[in-house]
Image (cartoon, rainbow, N blue to C red):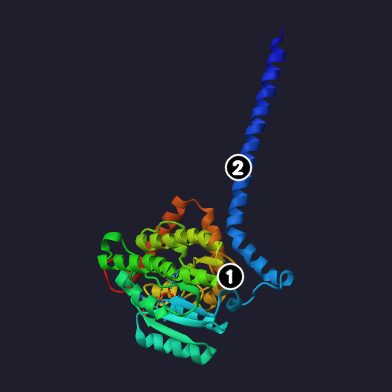
Amino acid sequence: MYSLNEVSVYTLLRMAFVWQLLSFAVYLVGLLAIATFFFDNFKSVLCIVKSILEPYFQPQLPQTLVEKFGKWAVITGSTDGIGREYAKELAKQGINVVLISRTKEKLIAVAEEIEREFKVKTKWIVADFSKGREVYTHIERELSGIPVGILVNNVGKMYDYPDELSKIPEDTIWDLININVAAVTIMSRMLIPELKKQKRGAIVNISSGSELQPIPYMAVYAATKRYVRCFSQAIERELAEHNITVQCVTPLFLVTKMNQYSDTVMKGGFLIPDVKSFTRSAVFTLGKSTETTGYWTHGLQYFFMKLGPEWLRIRIAHLMTRQLRREYLSTHGKKV
Ligand SMILES: NC(=O)c1ccc[n+]([C@@H]2O[C@H](COP(=O)([O-])OP(=O)(O)OC[C@H]3O[C@@H](n4cnc5c(N)ncnc54)[C@H](OP(=O)(O)O)[C@@H]3O)[C@@H](O)[C@H]2O)c1
């Protein structure tokens, strides 16, 4: 027979053991969550460091972008902003470029500038991705016979300024779907057979930091950019075995004409780099990491943003877009 004291000591010991077990489980879950968070945030940096060190340990591996991916790149939306700078950065590395945009005069000017400056071949294709399905036959015909090694799916559209869904013209919404969602999908599908044929290649999809959480007043734009990220991550796995790398780039605000609705953004600054510095840095990560914000101050912002829960980020994003909307309406003399 146990005495009363022996029973209570035994019960206390059992409770202490269960408590220890529970605390251990909580510590373990916490540790795993922190490790996953840090790995998620720093894997791009780790991959870049690994790629920088690789030539010292495996000098037989291809080093330059031409050696890795071939002599030709296609860049959509390449007469302005990020696309234009991607074309120039790739040309600087000896890659011939195919430029695709809507405006013939701008295409000719950029092509001439690139040929003059970097002594590479260029080709331009006039295409308006907002037209949807009909543009791709023409693009495919124009690209036939070109050994494309890099596809930069850059073309993208935002609303004229942040606003509530019901106030966005229906045509703008179709444009966003055709340009931000369909173009990246169909262009990739079109060029994957060519990349497979060459047994190497790269697809760079320009998403946006707005993919990180839903954004009120930019609802459709942010959702299309989330699509780009999901799509990129999935085809990255599909194509890895074919030696084709798929990179998703998620920049935050940059000084380009897409942000012309806001003087605050267009002023630029530490967190809002100019497009040239951004693109130089983003192209440096090509072939090194599959996911990147492209620029270190954007990486920092991403890191701190991810610390907050999604519901909080949505509310903060709402405050920001509301302020940007107000700024646009008041500078254009419209009713807020
Ligand atoms: N700027 C930012 O802060 C920022 C941040 C994150 C992500 N992004 C993403 O980065 C990409 C490039 O943005 P950006 O700021 O560089 O844009 P941008 O300065 O407005 O340039 C857009 C380019 O796309 C072309 N284009 C526009 N509509 C087109 C259409 N319907 N069909 C074919 N070409 C078209 C334009 O040339 P034409 O007018 O001659 O056609 C221009 O060359 C987009 O996907 C955007 O979502 C931008």
Question: Which class describes the residues within 10 Å of circle 1: few (<14), some (14-19), or many (20+)?
Answer: many
The alpha-carbon separation of the residues under discs 1 and 2 comes to: 34 Å
Element under disc 2: helix
Nearest the eye: 4 or 21: 21
Res 230 seen here: yes
Element under disc 1: loop
Where is 20 relative to 243, above or below? Answer: above
Question: Which class describes the residues within 10 Å of circle 2: few (<14), some (14-19), or many (20+)?
Answer: few
Residue placed under numbered mark 1 in the picture: 287
Q: Which quadrant: the C terminus?
A: bottom left
Where is 75 relative to 192, above or below? Answer: below
The part of the image, by quadrant, that contains residue 240 is bottom right
Residue 289 in picture, x, y percent from top left: 58, 66
Name the side, left or right, on which 216 lies relative to 230: left
Residue 333 in picture, x, y percent from top left: 28, 73
Establish whether ligand 1 lies closer than 8 Å to the Cβ of label 1. no
Residue under the image location 51 percent in, 58 percent down: 305
Single out the residue that lies furthest toward the bottom. Answer: 116
Residue under the image location 64 percent in, 41 percent down: 27
Residue under the image location 44 percent in, 50 percent down: 311
Residue 69 in picture, x, y percent from top left: 56, 74
Nearest the eye: 180 or 21: 180
Residue type at numbered disc 1:
Gly
Establish whether ligand 1 lies closer than 8 Å to the Cβ of label 2. no
Residue type at numbered disc 2:
Val
Where is 71 relative to 210, above or below? Answer: below
Residue 29's label in the rendered image is 2
Q: In which quarter of the image is ligand 1?
A: bottom left
